[in-house]
Image (cartoon, grey):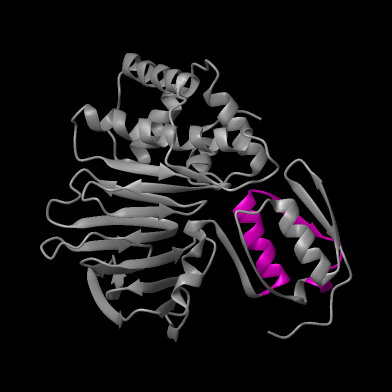
Amino acid sequence: MHLTEDLLRRYFENRCTPGEERFVEEALQRDDAAIPGLLEDYWAQSAEGVPLAEADRKAMFRDIQGRIAVDEAPQKTVSRPWFGGAAFRIAASVTILIGALVGGYFFFRGSRPTHYYTITSQADRQQITMPDSSVIWLASYSRLTYSSNYNKEDRRVRLVGEAYFEVRRDTQRPFIVATSTLSTRVLGTHFNVKAEQAEDNIAVTLLEGKVSVAREDSVQGTSEELALLDPDQQLIYNRQTGNVTRLQVEAYDYAAWKDGVLNLKNLTFQEALKRLEKWYGVTITVSDPAINRCIIHASFKNESLPNVLKTIGMTVGFTYAVESHQVKIVGRGCSATTR
């Protein structure tokens, strides 16, 4: 395997396999002469950065390497227990650090308004305090982008993945969360937005205050308000069909992940496995697809993957084996196939 621009791009966009992630992280810590140029190419294409001279590229790479090697300061990262080792959490910190350094390097050169990228790995969630003191919890496999103009005329961020927001009230500068097709506009409130790249549905769930959710047409430059949500309401928007669903929900269930709660309530086994894969950074396979029809009703707080699998296994009826980041589940299914 070779480090290429495409592999580096997929790494920063959280689209690598676990094996590719480990390869990139190891490569970034080696003295590879090609990496500074690859980093600049990635930044230039994704954030419209200006080209750097070769000496500047090398200096930026040395700075990244040096900070990775010596950085032992506490990160604003909340880690979930996995198998007890620290290696996975260290890898997560490296990913976050690289994203911050690349953005910061271009910003301090003062060339133009610059976007920052906060990237979390498979096994961590990241807490961010914004310049206006609003607090954002970024879920695993998620990315938040905001410009150096944040908190001047408005407070606009772009989200890929999932995040929970506690927004400081400011009637003069609205807080706007943009996803691929929706924007959520607030003055000050608590809410959760889930906009995964691999899923058709975008969900906005309100815990406190009010939020306005609108559909954005970037081609026409238009905006259409879809709903004004009250607490314990959720809007689900399907990107493929344009359908809008408004639900009354227990809102905290959709934001509990920020407190280390893994919510597997009323899910099929297949849906639950997808959450486990994302939560713990593993790949899970089943020996018998029939087991995917089982319904799970469970939640766990700060539990290790083996404890979660053991508990669910006693209910559903399966055994499992773990090898590296691969989990194999063996079971014939269950009779509980209705929600």
Query: What span is in magenta?
Result: 267-291
Image location of residue 195, percent across then percent down = 45, 64
Q: Is residue 50 visible?
A: no
Q: Is residue 283 magenta?
A: yes
On screen, residue 313 above or below 63: below
x, y (%) of residue 204? 40, 72
Magenta stretch secondary structure, dominant? helix
Which one is nearer the viewer's eye here, 231 or 200?
231
Is 290 above or below relative to 105?
Answer: below
Q: Is residue 257 visible?
A: yes
| Occupied quadrant, residue 134 | bottom left
Q: Where does the N terminus fall, quadrant-wise?
A: top right
Q: Residue 317 vs residue 35: left or right?
A: right
Residue at 26% from the left image edge and 62% from the top image edge: 176
Q: Residue at x 42, y 50 (%)?
A: 143
The quarter of the picture where the C terminus appears is bottom right
Q: Specify the quadrant of the image occupied by residue 89.
A: top right
Q: Is-magenta flag for residue 162?
A: no
Q: Is residue 101 above or below residue 234?
A: above
Q: Position of residue 227 (x, y in %)?
A: 31, 82
From this view, report whether residue 136 is shown above or below residue 12: below
Residue 320 point in image, percent of width and height:
84, 55
* Residue 46: quarter of image: top left
Q: Residue at x 74, y 55 (%)?
A: 307
Is 103 on the left or on the right of 2, as rendered? Answer: left
Q: Nearer the viewer, residue 259 or 226?
A: 259
